[in-house]
Image: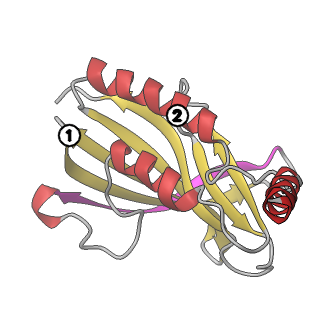
Amino acid sequence: MAPLITACLTLGLLSSCEKKSLPAVPFEKELALSKQIWLQFKNDCNDTYKYKIYEETYTNIDGEHTVSTVITVKEGIIIRREYIDESCQVDHPHDGESCVITQVIEWTENRDGLNTHPEGTKAMTMDNVYTKARNEWLKKMNGNFNYILATDNDGMISKCGNYNLDIFDGERFNGITILEIESWIP
């Protein structure tokens, strides 16, 4: 009987000394609250909305480029994906750095041709965004990662993802940046 009590006490001490583990999803409570706000918005707009995703800003010989994708959803079904790449040249760089748009590359895909262009964020509903946030972008991973969740769109996701701190060149951010979410009236 004494060896059984010793074994139980040893197991009890070991389990009480374990490090507290981080949540499986960083920002789990904040994400759940944001999702509740999203579900209310979705209900209020009859699941008909559009949102704009910031892709990137980069500079090349054409000037500074700002790239975005707009996804439009009608009654829960994605009906449009729009891509916009605006380049601008700095006019009078010493007089306030004004930017003059010099080129715009844009295209629109409708329901039957979604995701046929390689550029731009793939079309997904906001429900898909919240699922990806939980299962991919905020999923705790081995390695050196920082996680981010911002809810600056009236409580809905504005930025969500992770930064791989071991990558110094190239794409460090895995996630999404949403500039705006608004109800849409067809």
For the magenta stretch, what is the residue range? Answer: 96-110
Quadrant of the image containing the N terminus:
bottom right
Residue at 23% over, 32% down: 48
Q: Where is residue 43 in the image (x, y as percent from the top left)?
A: 28, 22
Q: How crowded is mark 2: few (under 14 residues within 10 Å), some or many (20 or more)?
A: few
Look at 71% across and 55% down and name the residue there.
147
Q: Look at label 2 and name its amino acid.
A: Ala
The residue pinned by badge 2 equals: 32
Asked whether, in this view, residue 181 is left or right of residue 7, the answer is left
Q: Give the camera-side residue of 71 and 22.
A: 22
- Residue 1 lies in magenta, yes or no? no
Q: Residue at x 66, y 60 (%)?
A: 162
At label 1, the amino acid type is: Gly
Whether residue 18 is visible here, answered yes or no, is yes
Nearer the camera: disc 1 or disc 2 = 2
In the structure shown, which secondary structural element does the residue marked by tag 1 occupy? loop
